[in-house]
Image (spheres, rainbow, N blue to C red):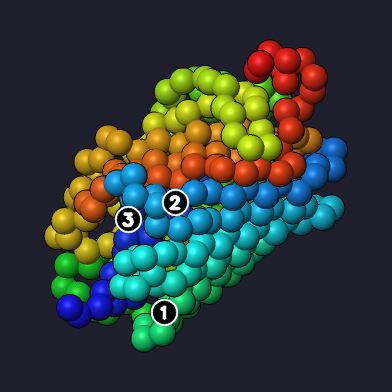
Amino acid sequence: MPSLKIPKFAHFVRYGGFLAIFAGFIPSPPSLAAEPSKPVTITYAVSIAYVPIGTARFSQSFKGSTYHLHLGAEFTGLVRMFFAPDLSSDAEGFDAGNHLVAQRYTLTVNHPDDPQRVDMKMSGGNVVSAELDPPLPERADRVPVLPEHKRGILDPLSGFLIPSASGQPNAASHCNHAIPVFDGAGRFDITLMPDVDQTYETAGYKGPAIRCLVRYTAVSGHRAKKTNVTFMENNRDIMVTLAPIPGKAYLVPLEISVATLIGNLRLRAEKVDGLTPANAETAAAAQ
């Protein structure tokens, strides 16, 4: 049986929504910095079609006006054998108080035969450079990436932190905007729509959360005739569950669910550190 090459795995990551489909950006002037917050670390169980395939770990830290985000994943079984043993992604930039201004994004997919790396630099929400190693192969049906597709964007990992205008967000007010994302290879837009407010409970967290429905729209860099692109654009089974970060005007994913061509891909928080509800009243109300 021939192994699946890394470009195909990268497409699974990209169109399957593992890193890139959840991003938020609300343009507004920089505001006064919020009170210092504790670092947040979330460990996710990852599964496809209810079959465990690995774990992922997200961490965020703020130092003054700067931030650093990290997401790593390790896979098991056939996914490890045929796709990749693990991947790692980092993002850094400035915290403007109510939105992030990304400066650098990297993604490394480890594979003994076909490793892949993305290294992207940004300034003021615009892509300055984006290097893919190896580059995507030329295809007649690949939609060209135009200069305007690299302006006013977020990288996929910085988009893990969704701006929140209030300490107690609700789905109606926070799941109602479109987000432009550039992942180093192409541009796509994500639209969040309200679903429900809820209480979420897992190890290390019991408190308020909101669930948003998600829609995907390919803009450039994709192959227009590929089945996975059409599938994702017509996908009505993508959801993200978000919880507020204490002391910061952002929400972070506790759960991500995406229907894919090979089954439902799900990341669910199984351990949370540093995400204690903001005050005793909130915690009490969640019980």
**Image quadrant containing the N terminus:** bottom left
The one nearer the camera, 277 or 224, is: 277
Do tag 3 and tag 2 residues touch (Cβ < 8 Å)? no
**Considering the numbered disc 2 on the image, is that residue within a helix, a strand or a loop?**
strand
Q: Neighbour class for label 3 at 10 Å: few (<14), some, many (≥20)?
A: many
Relative to 153, does residue 191 appear above or below in the rendering?
A: above
Query: Which residue is tagged 2?
Result: 46
Q: Residues within 10 Å of mark 1 (few under 14, many from 20)?
A: some
Front label number (3 vs 2): 2
Q: Which residue is mark 1?
A: 111
Name the residue at the bottom extreme: 113
Amino acid type, mark 3: Tyr
CA gap, disc 3 and disc 2 = 16 Å
Amino acid type of the residue tagged 1 in the rendering: His
Instruction: State the residue in front, 119 or 142.
Output: 119
Q: Which mark is residue 15?
A: 3
Note whether 8 is above or below 2 in the view shown.
above
Of label 1 and label 3, which has the lower sequence position?
3
From the top left corner, tell me how far across and down residue 92 is, in percent: 67, 61
Mark pair 1, 3: CA separation: 19 Å
Residue 32 visible in the picture: no
Q: Secondary structure under badge 3?
A: helix
Task: Give the Cα separation between the discs numbered 2 and 1.
Answer: 19 Å
Q: Which of labels 2 and 1 is toward the front?
A: 2
Image-based side of 67 in relation to 179, left or right: right
Q: Quadrant of the C terminus?
A: top right
